[in-house]
Image: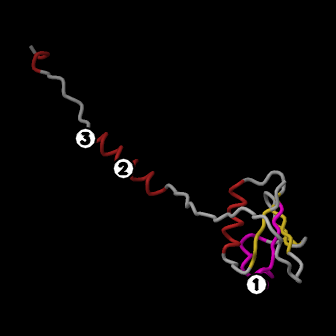
Amino acid sequence: MAKARQRRRRLSMTSLIDVIFLLLLFFMLTSTFSKFSEVELSAAGSGAAATSDKPPLFMQLGTDQLRLNGNGLALTDLATSSLAQAEEGTVLLVSLEAEVDAQRLTDLLVALRGLPRLRVTVLGS
């Protein structure tokens, strides 16, 4: 008769739901979200190129390095480099190494957007 009195208790789902919501809240607050930005590109048109008496600047972009006219430069130092003092309409030719990915190029173009005096041209392979 003792067995007949003991009823099986139902498992409470409240604590499990609380743990799931806490984990969800934790992962939402600790995750980082990527910021997407737009980079305006324009295709080269036909016609004569604008002539300038100032020679163009040459930049080489690698996977872990950036060179301006052969001198090493950090991506974060573009605003304080000689590019910031460039004359209006100065041409900047950007050459890409073979292993450069699209994100690295986009990061460079976003950084160069802050220097509106430059006319940036990305050289094809």
Relative to residue 35, is residue 3 drawn left or right?
A: left
Considering the numbered disc 2 on the image, is that residue within a helix, a strand or a loop? helix
Residue 87 image-quadrant placement: bottom right
Q: Circle 1: is it few (<14), some (14-19), or many (20+) Cα within 10 Å? A: few
Residue that numbered label 1 is attached to: 88
Residue 25 position in % (x across, y down): 39, 53
What x and y, as percent, mark residue 118?
75, 77
Query: Which residue corresponds to mark 2?
Result: 22
Which of the 4 image quadrants contains residue 20?
A: top left
Residue 12: x, y in percent?
Answer: 23, 35
Judging from the image, what secondary structure is the residue with disc 3 in?
Answer: helix
Magenta residue span: 74-95
Residue 90 in magenta stretch? yes
Chosen colour scheme: secondary structure
Distance from disc 1 to disc 2, alpha carbons, whole Å, reads 55 Å
Considering only vertical position in the picture, is 4 above or below 64?
Answer: above
